[in-house]
Image (cartoon, coloured by chain):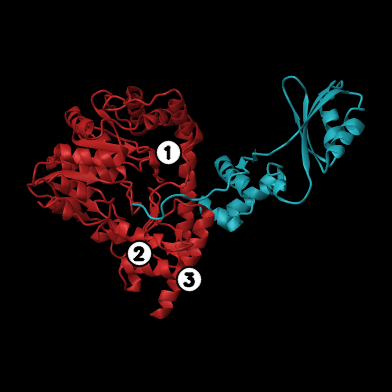
Amino acid sequence: MNEMREKILTFIEKNSRVSLKELAIILGVEEITVANEMAAMEKENIICGYHTLIDWEKTTTEKITALIEVRVTPQRGQGFDKIAERIYNYPEVTAVYLISGGYDLMVILEGKTLRDVSNFVSDKLSPQESILSTATHFILKKYKDHGTILAKKSKDERMLVTP
Amino acid sequence: MKKLLADKVLDIKPSGIRKFFDIVSEMQDVISLGVGEPDFDTPWHIRDEGIYSLEKGRTFYTSNSGLRELREEICRYLNRRVHLTYDPNKETIVTVGGSEAIDIALRAMINPRDEVLIPQPSYVSYEPCTILADGVPVFIPLQPENDFRLTKEDLLKAITPKTKILILPFPNNPTGAIMERRDLEGIAEVVMEKDLFVISDEIYSELSFLENHVSIASIEGMKERTLIINGFSKSYAMTGWRLGYACGPEELIGQMVKIHQYAIMCAPTTSQYAAVEALKNGDGDVAIMRESYSRRRRYLMHRFKEMSLPCFEPYGAFYAFPCIKEFDMTSEEFATRFLHEEKVAVVPGTAFGDSGEGFIRISYAYSLENLKIAMERLESFVNKLRSEK
């Protein structure tokens, strides 16, 4: 069954809009099998959501993304989890990772303007006791996101008919 | 002025695909299902090795039979995938695509009037290459009721005292048919009994969906009477790199190298460096592409079933070969009307031999999104034809 799960996940990771019926056809199994596995994986929180990859740069909506390196003092008995929670509960935070190396947490933040981000860092992050230091990096251009090259417009350049 | 051209060249028919290509190129917004090459880009790490070799200034000739490192990797690959052991020095040659290997193999073996058995439908170059080498092509029509596999009986019927070579093109372009071990055993028996030699064109060997590909050379007694032809085009999506290879008995490879050295010198050096990387680190890419083709194959089969279009299940390559006999038109008429009325290009089965009549080749080297649109159009076309009757 694990192999089936892997096949489902590999496919829907790139195309979550596929219907259950279609997914069953292309994987060569019964629709009910796919439906059951998907439901189970949703329940087990293996499938955590079905998102859409958007290149906001091509829209008129203002958006800015920042990567913030955060060094923290882990808390007794709770390690990094407690402080991570304090950060990830902010809705403007889109991702928080515990990182090995020169700092501890990587926080990804989305805001409308530079000011939004700097306010967040100065008002919400830095004042927290267990946070030792932060370093904020603004994303200037997204080339590739979630395995998809954003700039590239793929065009079939093959000859139309070949042996 | 003396007559400029050779009669035997003039006698060669222009390829049926070419004719169709000319019609398609004139049209706008055509969805093509007519391509015989992968839709994937060559995996980046392979391209990167090619680029690196250029940066390093590796722009010289290689030895005639190919980079030694590449020949060694080819032999390691064949050992790993089809359990055959070849000597990289004496039994291996790197060629300009599988097509060159077909050409020089036939030229190295054929004496005038030797007969070459060509199962059809199959790839378009076996017949002209045989004729150019002064051989006589003898066609074996593959039967739809055998899922287009070659049977012992069909083979026996075609053998004459002049028969020398059997071409074995599986997994097959255009039908998608494969030969399983038990099928090959029957063929091997006849080949040995009748003292024939096999040119086994295994260019689609990595695209076998039922079980791992079996080479006829791995059947006992067959290695010394088989030339394996393979290449990088289909398995690693490297068609434009023009790189293939052949492995077989030293006696034959030696003579093929001789033709190759005078006609070609050596296969492209950049491609050879990229191919080393493909064989060393490309197994994972091949598996991903195979899985992707298989999904599309299942989708097509499902759609054919929904529109009641008969098609045997193809277990190899990236083609399906549905039967269009119910519409009482030739496959060329069908393909031409389909193109004009629905703007989808498929290739008439007859482009691959007369026995392809009544069938069309549908390539699924296209994204699922494309296939979906094309299948909707095929369905409406088929329904229209049925209502016309």
Q: Nearer the viewer, residue B156 or B100?
A: B100
Residue at left 37%, top 65%?
B335
Query: Which of marks 3 and 2 precedes in the sequence?
Result: 2
Q: Look at discs 2 and 3 and give the one toward the viewer.
A: 3
Q: Which mark is residue B236?
A: 1
Q: Which chain is cyan?
A: A
Q: Secondary structure at mark 2?
A: loop
* Quadrant, the C terminus of chain B: bottom left
Residue B180 location (% of width, % of height): 32, 45
Q: State whether residue B190 appears in this view.
A: no
> Is the Cβ of the residue at disc 2 closer than 8 Å to that at disc 3?
no
Would you name the residue on which mark 3 appears? B380
Q: Nearer the viewer, residue B181 or A152?
A: A152
Drawn side of residue A124 relative to residue A3, left or right: right
Q: What chain is tagged by disc 3?
A: B
Q: In this structure image, what is the colour of chain B?
A: red
